[in-house]
Amino acid sequence: MSVNWNWSDKCGEVTLKQMHPGEEDKEFTISLYNGNCMVVMLHEFKDRETGEDMYNFFSFFSDKEHAKNCLGLSKGTNNIFCTDYQKFTKIRLNKKKCRYFKDLLTLFAQAFDNIEIEVYTE
């Protein structure tokens, strides 16, 4: 089954920090959307040449067990979002719009020793 979302269902964002040896660290904002899964993660940006709105599919959590596996919370797994190369440094969740608000908040708090968590309502 393919991952689907509606552009009107944005429910938050995470900040991704990438570290490249010999280069300055880079930060990216990854948008979080409700979809036909727990959460969809997209990197949205403007094309430098055309100014056109673009996006790259970054990741997703199909369900709570998949999220635990990706976040290194299941036995024998590693957090794929906290490595020597990249890590999530902040998560912002819209309390009213995020279908899995409590689960995501809990999972991110358990998975990261040093992450900023912001809750908002729009």
Image: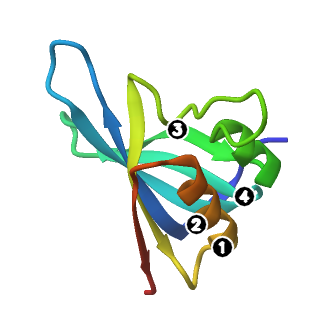
> Which residue lies under the disc numbered 2?
105
Q: Determine which of the numbered discs, if any, sits on residue 38 in the image.
A: 4
> Which residue lies under the disc numbered 1?
102
- Identify which amino acid the numbered label 2 is placed on: Leu
Q: What separation in Å lies between label 4 and label 3 (alpha carbons)?
A: 14 Å
- Identify which amino acid the numbered label 3 is placed on: Phe
- Identify which amino acid the numbered label 1 is placed on: Lys
Q: Determine which of the numbered discs, if any, sits on residue 53 in the image.
A: none
**Closest to the observer, 103 or 56:** 103
Side of 30 where 32 appears, left or right: right
- Identify which amino acid the numbered label 4 is placed on: Met
Q: Residue visible at 77% across and 58% down?
A: 36
Kindly report which numbered mark, 4 or 2, lies closer to the viewer in this rendering.
2
Q: What separation in Å lies between label 1 and label 4 (alpha carbons)?
A: 12 Å
Q: Residue visible at 52% across and 67% down?
A: 10
Q: What separation in Å lies between label 1 and label 3 (alpha carbons)?
A: 22 Å
Kindly report which numbered mark, 1 or 3, lies closer to the viewer in this rendering.
1
Asked if residue 118 is positioned above or below residue 38 in the image, the reply reads below
Where's the C terminus, which quadrant?
bottom left
The x, y position of residue 82, in whole percent, is 47, 35
The x, y position of residue 35, in whole percent, is 69, 60
Mark 2 neighbour density, 10 Å: few (under 14) some (14–19) many (20 or more):
some
SS label for mark 3? strand
> Which residue lies under the disc numbered 3?
58
Q: Quadrant of residue 104?
A: bottom right
Side of 111 where 83 appears, left or right: left
Upstream in sequence: badge 4 or badge 3: 4
